[in-house]
Image (cartoon, rainbow, N blue to C red):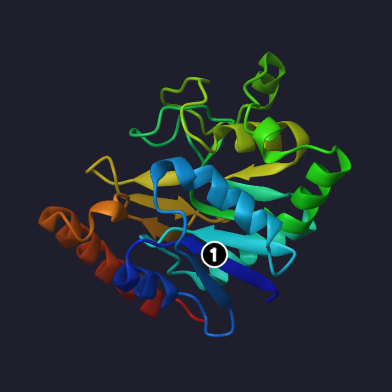
Amino acid sequence: MNITVYSRSNEDALFEQMKAFIPAGIKVLKCEQFHDWQHAADYLHYIIDYAETDWIANIDIDCFVFDWPGFTRLLEYLQQNGYDYCGMPDGGVHPGRSWSWCTMNPFFNIFNAAKIKAMRQVHGLSWEVIGKEGYRPEFEERRPAMIKGPYNHIAGEPFHGFFFWLFRMAKGYFMNARILDDELTTYLHGIDGEDIILHTWYSRLYSSDKRTKLRIDRYLKEAQNKKALCKL
């Protein structure tokens, strides 16, 4: 599989746990220079600009891809059906995320980095200009049926402009999710509607907050158990 995985890491132990879910033949790169909240967009720009393969995955350190065959089917589906990127909408799906459904949360994404990079170069656009993109009324006719919860179209995160631009210029696959009773922990669905990825959120508190560490470790174990049931 010709794909590279990137992760914006601020916690070595958790990075290694995330990496353990990825087959040994897949290159996983840790990006340590983008720690702060405001660096989220810079990180996405960086992995597009310096992608080592045409297709790349962005995976948070507290995001565990326990069903790698499901990941493979997702990637193949994107490639075979002309999709350029995927992820969970950043509004209307998760109770803690009520931004625009046109944008995606960057805890997990797959990008056709080669195409996205070429699009930017052809149009002569800087990342600064792309970052100023926003919602357009005509986007509404492409709203996915999965959008059931609250949302608004304010660009409230540094990366929202990037995803508004992608929504306008490229073809995105919007992944549905199952949210657990804690209204936080997230199972992301693959193309078959089955859980393939578990995201715990709040990895930045892993080393400083005992309750958060216990919660993440508990779900890490759950993801490890699920991985053991998947045939590689």
Q: Residue furthest left?
A: 210
Under circle 1, the secondary element is strand
Rendered position, 214 above or below 94 = below
Question: How far across and down, in percent of the image, does residue 13 sit?
Answer: 30, 73
Q: Residue furthest top?
A: 137
Rendered position, 77 above or below 185 = below
| Residue nearest the observer in this picture, 202 or 125 | 125
Q: Residue at x 28, y 67 (%)?
A: 220
Q: Residues within 10 Å of mark 1 (few under 14, many from 20)?
A: many
Rendered position, 26 above or below 47 = below
Q: Residue at x 62, y 33 (%)?
A: 131
Q: Is residue 54 visible?
A: yes
Q: Is residue 96 left or right of residue 22?
A: left
Question: How far across and down, in percent of the image, does residue 118 sit?
Answer: 83, 50
Rendered position, 97 above or below 205 = above
Q: Is residue 176 visible?
A: no
| Residue nearest the observer in this picture, 118 or 94 | 118
Residue position for label 1: 6
- Kindly indicate the quadrant of the structure image that contains residue 113: bottom right
Q: Is residue 138 left or right of residue 8?
A: right
Q: Amino acid at mark 1?
A: Tyr
Q: Residue furthest bottom?
A: 24
Question: How far across and down, in percent of the image, does residue 166 sit?
Answer: 69, 38
Marks counted in the figure total 1
Q: Residue at x 73, y 41 (%)?
A: 171
Question: How far across and down, in percent of the image, does residue 179 sit?
Answer: 34, 44
- Kindly indicate the quadrant of the structure image that contains residue 25: bottom right
Q: Is residue 158 left or right of residue 138?
A: left
